[in-house]
């Protein structure tokens, strides 16, 4: 949750700083980065669902904690490898990959194969 919240804050409030640190070209339409920031902020807020102990929490973690993070890892790796995107994206690939594997492992240890 903290990782996604910090990423969202950077995307919403520090977009130019992220661009400079990552060696990224400025976005033609900053609203794209801001919308992605809002999306990531909602993902971060969604991690509060499992803390309430209701049934939808595990499903949320499977979809966003495993699925989205694993697919994000694959996309970052593909973009860096085949599209020439900055190596800076490998930081996100590594973080998302670790979170996907950790979430998958915790879910498997605490209740079976699926949601």
Image (cartoon, rainbow, N blue to C red):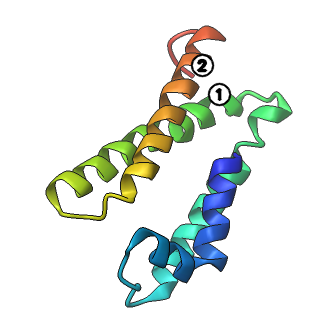
Which of the pair 61/25 is nearer the observer? 25
Q: Which residue is rendered at x = 84% and y = 34% of the image?
A: 52
Vertical relation: 25 (above or below) 94: below
Tell me where residue 65 appears, x and y as whole percent: 56, 37
Residue at 26 percent of width and 64 percent of height = 85
Q: Residue at x 19, y 63 (%)?
A: 84
Q: Does the rendering let one see residue 99?
A: yes
Q: Position of residue 67 (x, y in %)?
A: 45, 37
Of the numbered discs 2 and 1, the one sitting upstream in the chain is 1
Image quadrant holding the N terminus, namely top right
The residue lying at 58 percent from left, 69 percent from top is 37
The residue most toward the bottom is 28
State yes or no: discs 2 and 1 in contact (Cβ < 8 Å).
Answer: yes
**Quadrant housing residue 7:** bottom right
Query: Circle 2 is placed at which residue position?
Result: 107
Observer-side mark, 2 or 1, equals 2
Q: Which secondary structure lies at badge 1?
A: helix
Residue 62 relative to residue 91: left or right = right
Taking depth in this image into account, of 51 and 106 the one nearest to the observer is 106
CA gap, disc 2 and disc 1: 8 Å
Residue identified by numbered label 1:
58
Q: Is residue 111 visible?
A: no
Q: Position of residue 3 (x, y in %)?
A: 64, 49
Q: Secondary structure at mark 2?
A: helix
In the depicted structure, whether residue 74 falls above or below residue 105: below
Q: Is residue 35 above or below residue 111?
A: below
Q: Is residue 46 left or right of residue 91?
A: right
Q: Which mark is residue 9?
A: none
**Quadrant of the drawing holding the C terminus:** top right
């Amino acid at each position: 949750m903290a990782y996604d919240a910090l990423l969202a804050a950077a995307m919403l409030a520090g977009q130019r700083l992220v661009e400079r640190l990552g060696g990224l070209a400025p976005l033609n339409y900053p609203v794209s980065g801001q919308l992605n920031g809002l999306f990531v902020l909602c993902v971060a807020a969604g991690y509060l669902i499992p803390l309430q102990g209701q049934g939808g929490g595990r499903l949320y973690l499977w979809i966003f904690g495993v699925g989205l993070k694993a697919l994000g890892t694959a996309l970052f790796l593909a973009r860096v490898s085949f599209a020439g995107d900055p190596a800076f994206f490998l930081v996100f690939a590594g973080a998302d990959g670790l979170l996907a594997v950790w979430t998958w492992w915790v879910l498997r240890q605490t209740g079976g194969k699926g949601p």
